[in-house]
Structure formats: structure tokens, C-alpha cells
Image (tube, rainbow, N blue to C red):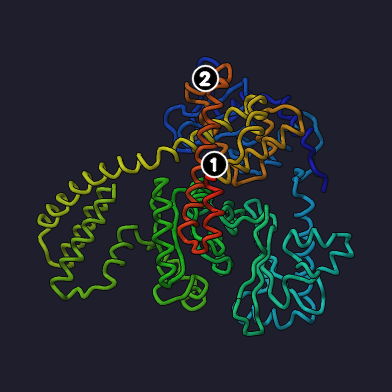
Amino acid sequence: MTKISEEIINDIRKKTDIVEVISRYLPLTKKGKNYFGVCPFHDDHSPSMSVSPEKQIFTCFSCGASGNVFTFVSNYEHISFVEAVRLLGNKLGYNLEHSTKIENPHQKDLEIYKLATKFYQNNINTVLGKNAIKYLEDRKIDRETIKKFEIGLAIQKVSLTDYLKSKNISLDKMIELGIANNTGNDIFVNRIIFPLYDLSGNIVAFSGRIYNTKDSSKYLNTKETPLFKKRQLLYNYHRAHEHLRKNDYIIIMEGFMDVIRASTIGIDNCVATMGTSFTKEHANLVKKMTDNIILCFDGDAAGEEATISAIKVLEEIHVEPKIIRLEDYKDPDEYIINKGKDAFINKITNAISVIDFKMQLLRHDKNLKDINDISLFLEETLKELTKTKDEIVVELTLRKMAQEFNINYDTLYQKYKQYDQTSKVNRQDNQVVVKKNDTSKYQYEKAELSLIYYMLKDSDVINIVEKKVGYFPTPTVRYLSNEIIAYYHKYGQINEADFISYISDKEELKPVISNILSLDSRPEFNKEKTNLMEIDDYIASINKYVKNKKIEELEQSLGNESDIKKQLEIINEISKIKGVKVW
Ligand SMILES: [Zn+2]
């Protein structure tokens, strides 16, 4: 397999006109400097997509779809970025038939994980793997599934570390990648190995499960590395993506084993958070895929808590998920093993709404034959219901309640109206409070995005950011900024459209880059020249936020510290940051 070099990708992009290419798919009309068309990536009725011939990028101000010519073709044709490069390149006479990969800066590390995976896979297929295979087959994981998810085996008798040494890979590298420990031994011993993937489907870590001993730690995971950041990854994301075209919904689960289990019954549009809580980054990733999100977390109390908190995270980005609860079963894995395919599909079809889920919670500790408990339950439910914006849901819920407790519908409706009024007033009050506390947060977030926006347009800003910004607080923004700086050092200039190709394999950057490109449609950003004073303001508000955050953390640790000497050290540090001398 040959790789398409960045030079060739950039060359193809420069020789291709984005306006001409998009016009092949849909009509574009010129308005001012830009062209406009009906966006093919959402249900668009007026032309929401603008195409800039000058910048060679497109942005939809309604759904946020954006990118360069390759992004457009790959999204429109449902092909990979590389395939889009090949398609457009071949039209220009490049012979790229056998090129399938773009060089990745972490390519060497990814190849080591791949070698390790092959090594583990080989183990499970030898005599030494007999018990492991039997264990998996007893748990109804057949050979086909083992192959599909590249499941392998770590055994004491054959050392991965020795094998990789024979391939000229240094011990330092193996320690860095979380494959070997400081004493030069394998991290995983006598465990069934499940490779963990990044958003593009590269193997970036492993999870090892014990299978023949009673070890207290059932699973052992590779430590977090620059390639393996759980907050930003969703297991099976790369495969689930492909299956969305068939079924437009995505199921979010807690463990990779749940996802593998669902796949054995033909349900492939599932992703898993892999032992971390559902984050804002996760929420943005799934929202990019579809608005139809189903939460299917573990059946225990912790799973219930996780569901409640995921609902909150999704509500912040205006997504209302559906919910599956598994009653007495531990997790989707066990549910499917015990109840089978039809029962689980039935669960999906009948996934409940947020309000139904919350009503179930409210029922938990009540005796609904007792008048007082009924009245409390009705009150709590009506209050919950005021949070729903969907009027049909409100009416249906009220009717259900009226029927269940044999109460007049109008009485219930009056009561609901009353709570709705109070909650509106409270909401307004809250909003004022939230705004007050959040000003600095809002400011730094805006400053971060604005700075990146200008970094992509003007290399002077890159230099300034490199000198003056200590640290971007938001992880994905920090990552993006590092990539821009790396790109600039490599090419000595910045080109927005080529930069989009450069980061095309980094799924986690896509939501933030599309946020930034969409700023283009706002007049306050679309200026001829960068205003350096504005840049300084942005930098100041980021540095101020970071400084205050640090002080806040130190003050908190001061409160928890009982040792006087350590207290003094912390006070000293706080004063240093504040720029005051104490002694
Ligand atoms: Zn759109």
C-alpha cells in the first residue's frame, strides 16, 4: 500500500476549483464574493451553504457542515477522505489507484499497536489459546466476532516485549505506548486482549480481561497516552458511522463488551464510553452523527446515575435522547445473552422518553396506593414536565396520569399551568445568575475560537499565540492550536483549505473546526485585516481565565491541607500567581 503524500494532496486541491466541483452536484448562485446553494447535508429549504472561491472552503450556517473540496466530496459520496482525494486526483491525471492511506504523524506508533495486535491474535489461535477460545465461546462470542473485533490473547510464555525488541522497537517506546512496564516486562499477562480504537478505527490501546483466575481487577486498560484519551474517544465510532445510513440512530453504551455483544445480534450502530462518564466531547461527536440518540447504560444504580448525567450533558446541546433501562440485568451484554435478540430489538423500538424515564425514577421510593405518596408523585412529575418543550409530550403525559390515578384531566392541566408559570419565573431568575457566573467562561470560550479563527488566516497571529498564550483551557482547542503550530513550522505558512486536509484523520477535531469555519458567516469576523489589539484582548482573557482557575484550585487545596508548612507553600504560590509579595 502506497501512501498519498501531503504534497500531492495539496497539489490536487490547488488544481481543483471547489465552486466547479460542488456545481457538479448542486446548483450554486453567486452573491457578492461567495456562491450559495441548498445544503445537501441537512433538510435545507433555503440556500444555507456558502462556498468561497477565494478560500476554497464551504460552510453551512445552518447545520455546520464545512470543509474543503475533499470534505465535500467525501461527505456527499459517502466515501473516505482518501477516496475523495483519489477521485479528484484521478480526474486530473494522477494515478492514485493503489494509494489508500494518508501519512499520519503517529504512523509509527500506530504500526506498533498493529504489530502487537497481530501478535496477540496469533497467540489466541495457537494451542495455548484453547482455554481462552473456549471461555469466549462459552460466553457466545464466536470465531467470526473474535476476528471482527481483533480479539487476542496475552500469555506468560510468549513475551510481547521480546517480540517487539526483535523488531527493533526500543523499550522506551514500549513504555511510552503502555505496552511494557519499567522493568521491561509485558503490561498484559494471561489476559484476553481487546484492541481499543480511535475515531478513525486505528488501534490506540488495549483492554485485557482475565479469564481463568479470580483476579479482583477484571479489566486492565492501557494508560492514557496522546493517542488514547478516553474523554474524546468512543469505542466502535468508526463502524457505527457506516451503519447509520441503514438505521438512523445511535445507541450509547458503557462498555466495549456491550457493543461487541450487540454486534453478535446484528446491531452495529452502537458506541461505548469505555469506563469514563459521558463528556461534552462525546455529546458533540454523537450529535455530529445523528440527533436520534438512545442511552443504554448499565442496569444498576450507577447506570441510572450515568443516564441522568448524560441526559444533562445532551440537553446542554439541545438533544433529547431516548432511554433504555435493563431492569434487573447488569448491562446490555448480559441482557442480550439472557433475553436474546428480539427482546433487545423490542427495547430499542420502545425506548422511552426523558420524561417517562424521570417518572419511573419518581415512582421508585413511593407507595402509589397511599394518597400522600400519590399527591407527592403528581407534584414532582408536573414540575418535571414543565422542563419539556414538546406540547404533545405534555398532553400525552397528562392524559396518562389522569387515567392512571383517575383524576380529571382539566384539574391536572390547571395544576401543570400553575407550575409552568412558577418555573418560567425561576428560569428567568436562574438565567441571570448563570450569566453572571459564566461571563468569564463565556469570554474565554469565545476568545479561544476567535484566536484559532485568526491563526488559520494570518501567520502573524500564530507567532503571537505561540509567544503569549500559555495554555488553551479547552482540550480540543489546545490540540487544534498545536496542530496549526506544527503545520506552520512544517510549511512556513498557513493555508486554511490545505490545513483541513492535514487534519482530515482527526475526527475529534471536526466539531471544533466546523464551529470555527462557521464564524466566517458573521460580519464581525469577516474583515480584510487582523486587528492586533483585538487579538491581545482575546489572549488576555484566556490567560486571565487560566490564572484564576489555577488560583481557585490552589485555594481549594489550601482548604484541605492541614500541614502548616504545606499551607505556607500554597499561599506563596498563590501570591506568586497574583503577583504580590507576601514576605
Ligand atoms: Zn447544512
Q: Which residue is mark 1?
A: 581
| Residue 546 visible in rendering | no
- Left or right of 266? Residue 125 is right
Q: CA distance from mark 2 to mark 1?
A: 63 Å
Taking the spot 12% from the left edge, 66% from the top edge, the residue there is 406
Q: Which mark is residue 184?
A: none
Is residue 143 visible to the viewer in this orientation of the structure? yes
Q: Secondary structure at mark 1?
A: loop
Corner quadrant of residue 403: bottom left
Expressed as whole percent of the image width and height from the top left, the position of residue 9 reads 75, 34
505 left or right, relative to 286: right
Q: Secondary structure at mark 2?
A: strand
* Left or right of 409, for residue 150: right
Residue at the image point whose x is 39% and y is 46% from the top: 318
The circle drawn on residue 29 is 2
Residue drawn at the location 74% of the way across and 74% of the way down: 154
Q: Nearer the viewer, residue 327 or 80?
A: 327
Q: Residues within 10 Å of mark 2 (few under 14, many from 20)?
A: some
- The type of residue carrying mark 2 is Thr
Q: Amino acid at mark 1?
A: Lys
Above or below, comparing residue 125 to residue 85 in the picture: below
In the image, what residue occupies the spot 40% across and 65% down? 305
Say few, some or many: other residues with alpha carbon within 10 Å of mark 1 (under 14 / 14 to 19 / 20 or more): few
Q: Quadrant of the C terminus?
A: top right
In this view, the residue farthest toward the front is 583
Q: Position of residue 228 (x, y in %)?
A: 65, 56
User: In the image, is residue 313 above or below residue 470?
Assistant: below
